[in-house]
Amino acid sequence: FSYRDTGPPRERQSDKMAAPMRVAVLGATLAATAAFTCTPNTGSMRLAAAVHELRPSGMPVSASQLSAPKLRGATVLHMAEGKLDKRAERRRIVSSENFNRRGFADTKEEVVGMMVEEFTSDMIKELKENNNMLVRDNVTVKLAVDFGFCWGVERAVAMAYEARSFYKDDTIHITNEIIHNPGVNSRIGEMGIKFVPVEEGAKDFSNIKSGDVVILPAFGASLEEMQLLDQRGVKIVDTTCPWVSKVWNAVDTHQRKDMTSVIHGKWAHEESIATASFCEDFILVKDMEEAKYVAQYMLEGGNKEEFLEKFKNAISKGFDPDVHLKKVGIANQTTMYKEETAAIAKLFERAALKKFGPEKLNEHFMALDTICDATQERQDAIQELLKDDGVDVFLIVGGWDSSNTAHLLEIVHMQGKTGYHIDMASRIKEDGSIEHREHDGTIAVKKNFLPKGKLTLGITSGASTPDRYMQDSVERVFLLKALEDAVPA
């Protein structure tokens, strides 16, 4: 199943796990992470998309263009006034004969060959065989121990490729980018898979007909979207990462204990949108600063009007901080900075302990481990590489809308080191400049970004980045240094 010798999170036993065992583990993981459901209650969440959603033309949509939840072309699905059994509703949908979350055995072998050809890298293989170090002329490359495609991303891309090969003559749509990588998404489009368009802040499902095939991306899809597609009678290929489903399980547990889900995540991110749709009551906090504001209100109250205005895009419908912060459960967008998630959980635990006392802590606070292994491993690996004082520049390769990649850059900058986040090799220009994304999301250009003379380059990539793309980027650095040597000072 895998083009790279890796297994699923926590289940990996060696880097040379046999393919049959990988498939068996995959099946076991999917069975173990059967997702739970709940009624779509996204309040003013922008269901349309996350920060960068591709239109069919390939043009990105910014967060400022998105509006309140709308599904154009959909028959409105009226819910009963009473609460829907969310777990039962999603189980109903996923148990349909039109729902596929296991892939296509008939096309797996073909797809493995395609992914090996398109995404693997001889350079990365050489690096791994040489203790993650490579020397070429006056450039030394040091590679983080964990990097690139995670198991969940690899699985999602493989299932999309398998679906295209299996449904050769069917119209195939995808509700969002398959992953946050521009090259991979372009490849998906080249295969004739149609991205659901966004018009005036609303996803337009009107072109999806009964019998069409619809792929749900690695981030998952909201319950409202799943209900629409189920009603439409399409064939659904669900590539949702099981680690995302694990978060859904956590928020379902919160609801069953009458707790509000405090989600560490970005309210406009596809994964957070999906997770919030499976909650009854929720609030999203993007960082420690927002978490402290909420925890302070939980302890002492405050200006409710100000609170609701501050979080107007990140709370459930009817959210009342005087009511919904008495019992809280912590969850997270799987790609967030793991240490910040843990710190936020500890912050709310202390607040609940102070307000309600140790004897009632478990009634008012819950934190389940929903931090993705792959995210954590890549963050740990870059932190380890940062201990090498000989590294001059760090290069982080991954989609500019990739949250997990952005956090890798954040870790580099927190250590006071020089690092650049690029989404593709072409950002490194022939004139010696680099077009890169700052941690705050701004795009900047740095002239002559490489120091003169000998260079030690530290490199890593986000969980949505194929090895080939990292190789292409390093080759650009080699070229620039070769040109430097060829031109007299």
Image: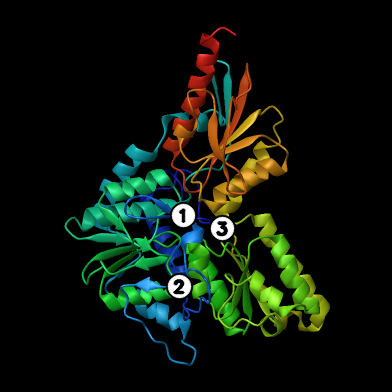
- Tell me the CA gap for discs 3 and 1: 22 Å
- Tell me the CA gap for discs 2 and 3: 28 Å
Tell which circle, 3 or 1, labels the residue nearer the N-terminal end. Answer: 1
Residue 87 visible to an observer of this rendering: yes
The one of 467 and 40 positioned closer to us in this rendering: 40
Q: Where is residue 156 in the image (x, y as percent from the top left)?
A: 39, 55
**Residue flagged by tag 3: what amino acid is it?**
Cys
Q: Position of residue 345 (x, y in %)?
A: 70, 66
Q: How crowded is mark 3: few (under 14 residues within 10 Å), some or many (20 or more)?
A: many
**Residue 443, image quadrant:** top right
Q: How crowded is mark 1: few (under 14 residues within 10 Å), some or many (20 or more)?
A: many
Residue at the spot x=37%, y=83% of the render?
A: 77
**Residue flagged by tag 1: what amino acid is it?**
His
Question: Could you tell me which secondary element the residue under label 1 belongs to?
Answer: loop
Q: Which mark is drawn over residue 52?
A: 1
Tell which circle, 2 or 3, labels the residue nearer the N-terminal end. Answer: 2
- Tell me the CA gap for discs 1 and 2: 16 Å
Q: Mark 3 = which residue?
A: 372
Eye-nearest disc, 2 or 3:
2
Image height check: is 122 above or below 443? above
Q: Position of residue 359 (x, y in %)?
A: 80, 83
Q: Mark 2 = which residue?
A: 69
Contact flag, marks 1 and 2 (Cβ < 8 Å): no
Residue at the spot x=69%, y=78% of the render?
A: 305
Q: Position of residue 195 (x, y in %)?
A: 33, 57
Tell which circle, 1 or 2, labels the residue nearer the N-terminal end. Answer: 1
Image height check: is 273 above or below 149? below
Instruction: Answer left or right for 360 relative to 329.
Output: right
Q: Which mark is drawn over residue 192?
A: none
